[in-house]
Image (cartoon, rainbow, N blue to C red):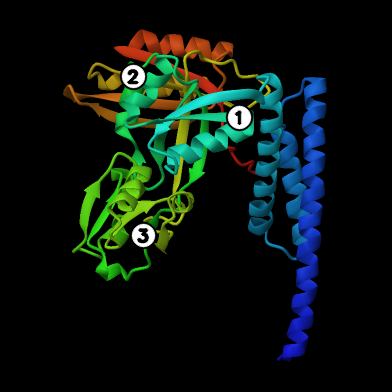
Amino acid sequence: MPTNSALRVFRDQINKIDEKIVTLLSQRHILVSKIAKSKIENNQSIRDIEREKKILQQLIFLGKEKHLRAEYITRLFQLIIEESVSIQKKILQKFYNNHKLHSASFSFLGPKGSYSHIAACKYADRNFKICITNECETFQNVITAVENNKSDYAVLPLENTCSGYINEVVFLLRTTNLFITGELNISINHCLLSTEDIALDKIKTVYSHSQPFQQCSDFIKKFPKWKIKYTKSTADAMKKIVLYNDPRNAALGSEIGSRIYGLKILSKNLSNKEKNITKFILLQKKPIEVSEKIPAKTTLIFTTGQKSEVLSKILLILQEKAIIMNKLTSHTIYQNLWEDMFYIEISANLSSTIIQETIKQIQNITKFCKILGCYPSEDIIPVVS
């Protein structure tokens, strides 16, 4: 059995190896950026899937020689490749869309500190020098601000890994004349906040938007005596408990929000699932053209007029044309409880001839069909050896 001094030696050796790994990853990052610039100059696509597969197979073989499991090598290098693709996407998209412009204005739900505000700032930081914010009280107001030229972008939460799609947003997409031009994944860390440190069993009322209550339902159930109060946003909840100034009031909100409003974090990481991610979409008045060199998504909504065979035909069309479908969800139409609206997301560029033909076929067999937009994909599909 190793002595304590021997363990320290081994751990010091591991620490030095880890430092070398980080240094090498940093060097790889620099090379990836240079590759992206080279691809711009030579008009090349971001990904070469066949090359990625070949490299992964070679690394798996090398790993076996070094007594490392294939699964371990695969997961490790899938993550490294995904990060490389993500870096190149950002560089190429800025070039093709002439991004990093001076400024842009964003409308979003809630006061500063809401997750929508965090998403707006993150997107703006990637693409603009200055972010002008426009706080709104409802999702409809967020959209209306762009429709009335008060903002350049509308930022809306579309889907959450814990609570699913936000139906109100999906149905607003059907009626608005705006187009989806971007997406953004935000990691959600719901915190229980109050004006002072207080024992959880002393809390009387908890404020928040309906979504965090759904996403943290397992935690909330542990305190059945708490009174639940719904607010327009998480930031609105934080503002309320500051205004009421009673430590027995608490809010479910963000860690960033706690700093903005000077609140104490009583508990954090409260989501039902360990990975709680919300996908936000960005909408503008005009659609954008996405370079064919950049992985893109195209999204549609359609209704079938209660004809069950239509959905089967659409799936068959996609299969025959080898088009990758990322998502297909149904949403009951409130005005007609016997009919569903379908939201479909495919990995393809709207400018391609195949997609244009596919959409025409779908439009011919559906009661209603609308193109929501084509935009750079935030998600990266891992390569498989």
Q: Assess disc 3: are there few (<14), some (14-19) or many (≥20) residues with their C-alpha within 10 Å of its C-alpha.
A: many
Locate residue 164: give its quadrant.
top left
The disc, 3 or 1, on the residue closer to the chain's N-terminal end is 1
User: Relative to residue 85, is residue 239 drawn left or right?
Assistant: left
Q: Quadrant of the N terminus?
A: bottom right
Q: CA distance from mark 1 to mark 2?
A: 31 Å
- Name the amino acid type tagged 3: Thr
x and y, in percent, of residue 15 in the image: 76, 70
Residue indicated by mark 2: 174
x and y, in percent, of residue 342 in the image: 33, 25
Question: In the drawing, what numbered circle is on residue 207?
Answer: none
Nearer to us in this view, 340 or 117:
117
Residue indicated by mark 1: 130
Q: CA distance from mark 3 to mark 1?
A: 32 Å
Residue indicated by mark 3: 195
Q: Assess disc 2: are there few (<14), some (14-19) or many (≥20) residues with their C-alpha within 10 Å of its C-alpha.
A: some
Q: What is the secondary structure assignment of the residue under circle 3? A: loop
Q: Quadrant of the C terminus?
A: top right
- Name the amino acid type tagged 2: Arg
Q: Is residue 2 visible?
A: no
216 in relation to 157, above or below: below
Q: Residue at the location (65% across, 58% down)?
A: 72
Q: What is the secondary structure assignment of the residue under circle 1? A: strand
